[in-house]
Amino acid sequence: MKIEKPIPNSILISESQIRNRIQELGNQITQDYENQELVLICVLRGATIFFADLVREISLPLRFEFLQTSSYNDSTEPSKNIEFIREGSNYVKQKHVLIVEDIIDTGQTLEFLIKHLQSLEPKTIKICTLLDKPSRRQFSVSVDYIGFEIPNVFVVGYGLDYSQKYRNLPYIAVIESTDENTS
Ligand code: IMP
Ligand code: MG
């Protein structure tokens, strides 16, 4: 029988840990943006589940926007090329913008997003990420709200994927890398 590998096989962050941390983040964001016009930007697709849970913990009359990027490696360059698939940031000008991400790894995607959003003249830009892998950073970006710092492991679940799979797991699990070819 063909078994699909790798398999997410150890839970790094449980459902209740995620729920509690998102409540804390929501309370903090509610306090920080009191009486401000806030636009929350969900970075598709990985941040969708985090975004949906986070917005329900923020007691402010905020607005949603959705962006999606795609990245590919050009063999001649060490870094990735990033481009927009969906660029829906019409309501950013003179607003307070909070980018909601699933995970910050090298920081390259975020650097690209911040540059783009800055050109649209928001009042402020801040970053909220569920997960942060600081040991992998290559682009210096300052992150304002962090759910959890994690070590240099590949994780899936709660919106994060491996080859588009496992986004629907309700917790964060580590994918064990394996060289085995299962047949
Ligand atoms: P960066 O541009 O290197 O910061 O990459 C960020 C993107 O890489 C994230 O938005 C994810 O799509 C992907 N990514 C990085 N690490 C992981 C991981 O451990 N699991 C799933 N996706 C990841
Ligand atoms: Mg992503």
Image (cartoon, rainbow, N blue to C red):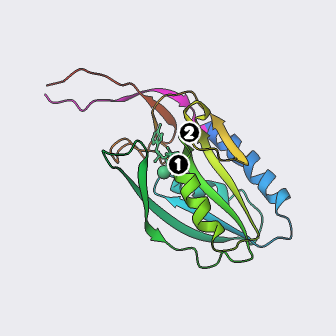
Asked if disc 2 is less than 8 Å from ligand 1, the answer is yes
| Residue 118 to residue 71: above or below | below
Look at 62% across and 67% down and name the residue there. 117
Q: Position of residue 131 (x, y in %)?
A: 59, 40
In the picture, the quarter occupied by the C terminus is: top left
Q: Amino acid at mark 2?
A: Gln
Q: Amino acid at mark 1?
A: Gln
Q: Quadrant of residue 113?
A: bottom right
| Residue 134 to residue 58: above or below | above
Look at 69% across and 47% down and name the residue there. 143
Look at 77% across and 63% down and name the residue there. 59
The number of numbered discs placed on residues in the rendered structure image is 2
Asked if disc 1 is less than 8 Å from ligand 1, the answer is yes
Q: Which numbered disc covers residue 138?
A: 2
Q: Is residue 175 left or right of residue 117?
A: left
Q: CA distance from mark 1 to mark 2?
A: 7 Å
Q: Position of residue 15 (x, y in %)?
A: 58, 38
Instruction: Return the disc, 1 or 2, that comes first in the chain's sequence.
Output: 1
In the picture, the quarter occupied by the N terminus is: top left
Look at 58% across and 70% down and name the residue there. 65
- Closer to the camera in the image, 50 or 14: 50
Location of mark 1 (residue): 108
Q: Is residue 28 magenta?
A: no
Q: What secondary structure is found at the residue carrying circle 1? A: helix
Q: Position of residue 71 (x, y in %)?
A: 40, 53
Residues at circles 1 and 2 in contact by the CB criterion of under 8 Å: yes
Q: Is residue 173 left or right of residue 39?
A: left
Report the residue that reaches farthest toward the front: 76
Q: Position of residue 64 (x, y in %)?
A: 61, 70
Magenta span: 1-15
Q: Is residue 3 magenta?
A: yes
Q: What secondary structure is found at the residue carrying circle 2? A: loop
